[in-house]
Amino acid sequence: MRSLIGAIVGLFCLSAPAIAETPAAIVEDVQGKVEGIEFMDYVAPGKIIKLGPKAGITLSYLKSCLRETITEGVVLVGAEQSTVQLGNIQRVKVPCDANAAQLSEREANQSAATTFRSMRADANSAPAKLPTIYGVAPLIQAKSGSTLVIERTDGKEPTITLALKNDIMVARKFYDLSKAGKSLTPGGSYLAKLGNKRYTFQVDASATTSPTPIIGRLLRLE
């Protein structure tokens, strides 16, 4: 079996694309011993993951919104989905918005004035659609030690101000509003401020407090 796994890894290495800087997926869960992979790690196209007996991993793809539960075998991370040999994989498409999960540097650094100008619509056009999350409690990627402010932009709502301390961060780089007991309003539009960065987003009107896959409520501000 080890020689077979080694041969498959060799074939994957030959066929895998060059590893890109931009991550393709995030690790939502790890079961058993999986070397080199931890909960909430990002993985790029070309990454090879070996899963031992009874080991498993859950990957959520940022672009395709596919959530994969994989047990055992050898995994080759792709741009939008994985290739698996000698293992089992279950895929499901979940509600998510790649524009929310993949925040660009331009969007992250634009000023508040620019942000609100981009939200305006001409009289003869429909309003621009903001990046959307599908849970009322976003999971926000940000550096610890900073202060995060979330303001409602389309109605009155108390401003949320959060000191991002190491002891409350998930995997040292994510702040989970659900663990803090805070939530936003379904259908609401918001402005997140982190230092001099500004980012607008909205909460889907059908969002609930029920558990939501990470990829559906992820906002990458850093």
Image (cartoon, rainbow, N blue to C red):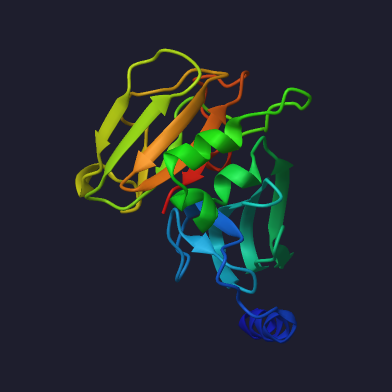
Instruction: State the quadrant of the N terminus.
Output: bottom right
Q: Position of residue 150 (x, y in %)?
A: 37, 31
Q: How many marks?
A: 0
In the figure, 220 relative to 49: above or below? above
Q: Is residue 217 visible?
A: no
Q: Residue at x 62, y 56 (%)?
A: 71
Residue 55 percent location from the top left of the image: 53, 59
Q: Which image quadrant is residue 169 in?
A: top left
For this rendering, which residue is in front, 55 or 178?
178
Image location (x, y in percent) of residue 153: 47, 23
Q: Does residue 82 appear anywhere in the picture?
A: yes
Could you tell me which residue is drawn at 47 percent across and 48 percent down?
A: 110
User: Viewed as shown, does residue 68 lie left or right of 170?
Assistant: right
Foreground residue, 197 or 86? 197
Tell me the quarter of the picture where residue 10 sits. Answer: bottom right
Query: In this rendering, would 82 be left or right of 196?
Result: right
Residue nearest the viewer, comparing 115 with 206: 115
Q: Residue at x 57, y 70 (%)?
A: 49
Screen quadrant of the C terminus:
bottom left
The percent coordinates of residue 158 (x first, y second) are 33, 17
Instruction: Give the residue at the far top of this rendering.
Output: 156
Residue furthest front in the image: 123
